[in-house]
Amino acid sequence: MAKLYVMNCKTQDETFSYRVPESGRLMTQTIPKGGQVQVYRDESEPILRGIMEQHRKYGAVEACDIDRTKPFINLAFQIDKPFTPDQILYGFQHNTDVLTERGEEQRNNAAVAIANNVEKVAQEQGRRLTGSELELVDETTGDENSGLATKIIVDPAISKAEHGKKQKGRPRGARA
């Protein structure tokens, strides 16, 4: 008989719901943030893999694939051995990096959109915009620090030249 361990790589608790193939009954277990549980019971490996297959479409990955996965990881699983503290930390760090990259990309896209709107308004008034800067500053107080302190420069000449092309890590026309 095998054991199925599922790790929650998110910063909130997970209510893990699944159906056991043989009974069809819905079962749930709570997996704490950054924690792991043994799911179901000691069972044959095909049944345990069947349980995890239900969650692959929602971002669950096998533990051996965590370092090869680019998107956000909801859950990770492995058969017959619990996750080590290093694996749990790696899953958390992976997700932090993915979310940081997404936030940076969204801020760059927002800067380009703002610059395009300002350029449009300037053109409507018969003026010409030669460039713009958007500065995001972290104004948290006390010991809190969001880590947000970014300056984004949008050059319309680059925006037009790169129209339709997206460079890795930044949108058209954005320079960080």
Image (spheres, grey):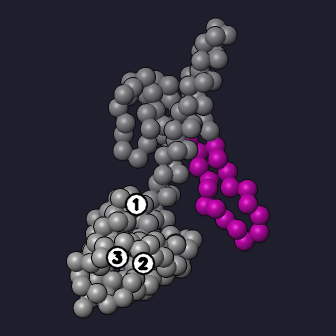
In this orientation, does residue 124 appear?
yes
Which of pointers 1 and 2 lies earlier in the amino acid sequence? 2
Q: Residue 134 appears in which quarter of the rendering? A: top right
Q: Is residue 17 above or below residue 123?
A: below
Instruction: Give the residue pinned by disc 2.
Output: 7
Q: Earlier in the sequence, mark 3 or mark 2?
A: 2
Which residue does the image show at 50% across and 58% down from the upper left?
100
From the image, tell me which residue sits under label 1: 58
In the image, residue 126 lies in the stretch drawn in magenta: no
Q: Which residues are magenta?
A: 135-153
Q: Which residue is mark 3?
A: 23
Q: Residues within 10 Å of mark 2 (few under 14, many from 20)?
A: many
Q: Position of residue 2 (x, y in %)?
A: 26, 88
Locate residue 141, reporting x and y percent.
77, 64
Q: Is residue 14 left or right of residue 87?
A: right
In front here: 66 or 20?
A: 20
